[in-house]
Image (tube, rainbow, N blue to C red):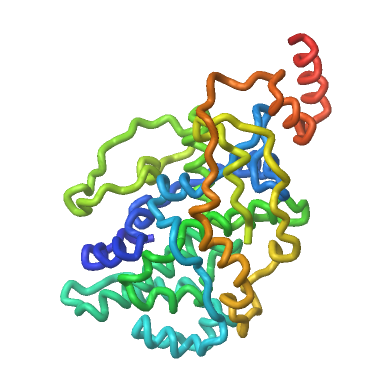
Amino acid sequence: MIEPPNQILEYLRLAGFYGVARVGQFDYDQSLVSALVERWRLETHTFHTTRGECTITLEDVAIQLGLPCVGMPVIGKTDFNWQDVCEWLLGVRPPADRILGQRLLINWLEEHFNHLLDDADDVQVQQFTRAYILRLIGGYLMLDRSCTMVYLMYLPLLYNMEEVGNFSWGSAVLAHLYRELCNATNPTEDGIGGCLSLLHLWAWDRFPTLAPQQPVSPDPQSNIYPLLPPLGFRWKNVGQNPRPKWHHPDRVLRQFGRQQPIPVMPVHLGNYHTIQLRGRISTNWTEEYSNFIEAWNRWPHAVVDAPLALGELDQTSEYMQWYWRHTRRWIQRVSGDTGYVADIAE
């Protein structure tokens, strides 16, 4: 992604995408991704480790990427004439061979929105901002495994730039990543999409020993971009060392310094978890997901809380005894034998 031009910064701020536009990209650690996928559990959307469950939460999305995580659900219709919509909101009409169903080739956006003229008027600035956000969505935040197309369902949501920030973009990004992690656990799948930057930022922040060892340097462009970037910016351009998707924060309360009780049964989504946008060109998603939208709008009543944790949980605690009965503690037989001996020794 190109750095956001100065003219669009205010619109990015209003839309809630200023932070993620500053985070930047870095080389992915495929070994880290594979290790996390191996520990991912579909039924709970949590990583199972030897010390309990943990997961990426909306708080991580807000802090690491700076995306808004409260507000209206990111949802819309897919039965528009997308060439007309692009011409209306982007100012350019893509040829029919650049649109597949309701997906647009990202390289078409790169060709037409790679540079913003210094004397661009406000209409052109808004059109460039919409294209920039689409590129962020399709190429960084909610990318599919092809990394070549973006769903145009998001474009009408960018119509009024002052209201774009009222959508919960962060929860959409997290739900998409949850879904991709679930798909990646299937042995027949050979790739993973979603916001892998968020996956890395979360892992490096929660498990510092896994993070690349580099000093945190000040922002060299602070004079150009006066607003501070989100926490994930510290890993911008880092090099690697050689070495409806349910949100379950009640299962990872220890991440927030709280006592972790034995959790209730996770919410099962059934076939909803396998639905794709591809091919659904005449679906009114607002009606299709009305029950989930109602649940989302009740989010203030679903915020979890618990007493502060007092010290570390040990293996004799009620929670750890329950956890060990429900997790996969070892991946290999030899690891299981070694771990079992260690348990007996203690």
Quadrant in the picture for residue 115: bottom left
Quadrant in the picture for residue 32: top right
Above or below residue 143? Residue 117 is below
Query: Taking 130 as reference, is 185 left or right?
Result: right
Give the image location of residue 219, x and y in percent: 26, 43
Inspect this view and state whether residue 55 appears: yes
Above or below residue 54? Residue 275 is below
Front residue of 94/287: it is: 287
| Residue located 40% across and 71% down the image | 110
Give the image location of residue 248, x and y in percent: 61, 47
Give the image location of residue 10, x and y in percent: 24, 64
Give the image location of residue 68, x and y in percent: 41, 57
Q: Quadrant of the C terminus?
A: top right
Above or below residue 26? Residue 210 is above
Quadrant in the picture for residue 70: bottom left
Q: Quadrant of the N terminus?
A: bottom left
| Residue located 24% across and 51% down the image | 227
| Residue located 50% across and 35% down the image | 256
Farthest top residue in view: 345
Front residue of 261/170: it is: 261
Inspect this view and state whether residue 241 appears: no
